């Protein structure tokens, strides 16, 4: 699991090597590479996606992309029912949001990623459950890996390109 900090773009290979050493996993044991495809800064998303694509090709394993909001909602408690809106700060006054529903503990999207102002975010009320990325203590990379491994989101939310094809990153505009 490679953390999504600014430092990661400068030393992603070192962070990757440390993560392997810390986990005790050998490169030969990796059977897929999971990467958060955004939304996020151009440099951060591009660095992560490029590294993941290269690693996947080098190891000859499956590449799986998941957007940040799907990873966050997939990590939510499986007891969450009904409509869920997941949000992540885009800038000082805007948030990226996506609406989901849960069925049998699996998140399914029923909207594309959208941008709303923070006042609109504050107005979302029950019965809709809000999940704010700022309230999550785990790294986004860890959440994404867990969500994909445990199949907590529907397959439609994953970007699984065929060998030689690229992922579809989501950048901040």
Image: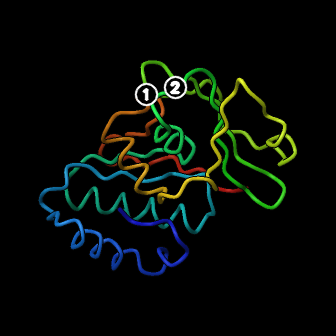
Furthest residue to the right?
119
Q: Secondary structure at mark 1?
A: loop
Depth check, front residue: 29 or 171: 29
- Graded by Cα atoms within 10 Å as few (under 14), some (14 to 19) or many (20 or more), the crowding at tag 2 reads many
- Say which quarter of the image contains residue 93: bottom right
**Residue 94, above or below 107:** below
Q: Secondary structure at mark 2?
A: strand
- Residue 43 x %, y %: 58, 69
- Residue 59 x %, y %: 20, 59
- Residue 132 x %, y %: 65, 47
Residue that label 1 marks: 154
- Residue 172 shown left or right of residue 122 in the figure: left
Check if mark 2's residue and mark 1's residue have beta carbons within 8 Å.
Answer: yes
Q: Residue at x 39, y 41 (%)?
A: 147
Label of residue 108 in the image = 2
- Residue 73 x %, y %: 53, 38
- Say which quarter of the image contains residue 83: top right
- Residue 72 shown left or right of residue 85 in the figure: left
| Quadrant housing the N terminus | bottom left
Q: Residue at x 48, y 27 (%)?
A: 79
- Residue 97 shown left or right of residue 144 in the figure: right
Figure colour scheme = rainbow
Q: Residue at x 38, y 39 (%)?
A: 160
| Quadrant housing the C terminus | bottom right
**Residue 44, above or below 31:** below
Depth check, front residue: 119 or 135: 135
- Graded by Cα atoms within 10 Å as few (under 14), some (14 to 19) or many (20 or more), the crowding at tag 1 reads some
Q: Residue at x 21, y 73 (%)?
A: 21
**Residue 10, above or below 110:** below
- Sequence-wise first label, 2 or 1: 2
Mark pair 2, 1: CA separation:
6 Å
């Amino acid at each position: 699991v490679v953390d999504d900090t600014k430092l990661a773009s400068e030393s992603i290979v070192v962070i990757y090597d440390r993560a392997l050493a810390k986990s005790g996993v050998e490169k030969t044991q990796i059977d897929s590479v999971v990467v958060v495809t955004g939304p996020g800064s151009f440099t951060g998303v591009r660095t992560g996606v490029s590294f993941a694509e290269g690693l996947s090709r080098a190891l000859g394993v499956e590449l799986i992309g998941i957007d940040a909001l799907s990873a966050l909602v997939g990590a939510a408690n499986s007891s969450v029912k009904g409509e869920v809106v997941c949000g992540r700060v885009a800038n000082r006054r805007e948030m990226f949001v996506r609406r989901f529903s849960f069925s049998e503990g699996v998140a399914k999207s029923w909207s594309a990623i959208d941008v709303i102002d923070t006042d609109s975010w504050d107005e979302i009320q029950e019965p809709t459950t809000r999940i704010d990325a700022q309230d999550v203590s785990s790294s986004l990379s860890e959440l994404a890996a867990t969500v994909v491994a445990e199949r907590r989101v529907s397959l439609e939310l994953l970007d699984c390109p065929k060998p030689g094809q690229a992922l579809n990153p989501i950048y901040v505009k």
